[in-house]
Amino acid sequence: MPDNQKIVIAITGASGSLYARSLLGKLVLLKEQWEAVSVIMTGNAREVWKTELGDESFRDYDLPFFSQTDFSAPFASGSGRYGTMIIIPCSMGTLGRIAGGISSDLITRAADVILKEKRKLICVVRETPYNLLHIRNMEAVTLAGGIICPATPSFYSRPKTLEEMAATVVDRVLDLAGLDISTFRWGQ
């Protein structure tokens, strides 16, 4: 992991706010492992968070939040040197725009920058079932260098709560991002 890891987190309006909350909470605890974490949260994501989690606790994180139209954000350019982007949850609309190269907002622009700079894009897709367009868009993003990490919990660790189930996905995302975490490891 680079000493100066910079991470951008995008939260879209797909169901799965629990994943985003878990990721933000864990990143705050791992702050010695990153130089910067910046967040983009769509208006729909805020509404879904309130509906699913019953609060506005996204406001409690001491992290910089950027609007979808703020193209002056440091990660809107490769010169900002952000090495990882995590979209959690990633809506199929966002995935489709990324797959089509449509940089119409800060999330899709940042994803385009990450891909063109050959850095790490992790899309935590949250939809079921997938249609053929979803599958082809996942293929296109994968071929462009992105990582598709479906929001599919594992059960090896025998999670007992929704938060523990979400953590099985978030811990995998943190592993993919190259952060050093303590988590369930198969066979250990």
Image (cartoon, grey):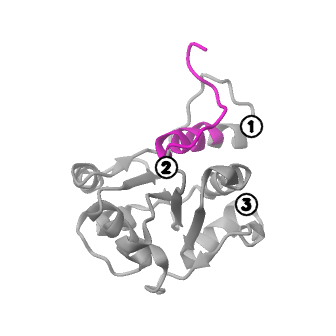
Residue at 60%, 61% (x, y): give it.
35
Residue at 56%, 72% (x, y): give it.
41
Q: Sequence order check: which comes first, mark 1 or mark 2?
A: 2
Give the Cα separation between the discs numbered 1 and 2: 33 Å
What's the residue type where badge 2 is placed? Pro
Q: Which residues make up the magenta segment?
A: 167-188
Q: Quadrant of residue 188?
A: top right
Secondary structure of residue under mark 2: loop
Q: Sequence order check: which comes first, mark 1 or mark 3?
A: 3
Is residue 182 one of those drawn in magenta? yes
Nearer the observer, disc 1 or disc 2? 2
What's the residue type where badge 3 is placed? Leu
In the rendered image, residue 101, in percent from the top left (x then y), is placed at 24, 70
Mark 2 surroundings: few (<14), some (14-19) or many (≥20) residues within 10 A: few
Secondary structure of residue under mark 1: loop
Is residue 20 one of those drawn in magenta? no
Residue denoted by label 3: 53
Give the Cα separation between the discs numbered 3 and 2: 34 Å
The residue sitting at the top extreme is 187
In the rendered image, residue 181, in percent from the top left (x then y), is placed at 63, 37
Residue denoted by label 1: 161
| Along the viewing direction, whichever of 109 and 35 lies nearer the viewer | 35
Secondary structure of residue under mark 3: helix
Residue denoted by label 2: 2
Position of residue 162 in the picture relative to residue 95 (left or right)? right
Q: Vertically, is 162 above or below 156? A: below
In the rendered image, residue 92, in percent from the top left (x then y), is placed at 38, 61
Q: Sequence order check: which comes first, mark 3 or mark 2?
A: 2
| Residues under numbered marks 1 and 3 in contact, where contact means CB atoms less than 8 Å apart | no
| Along the viewing direction, whichever of 6 and 140 lies nearer the viewer | 6
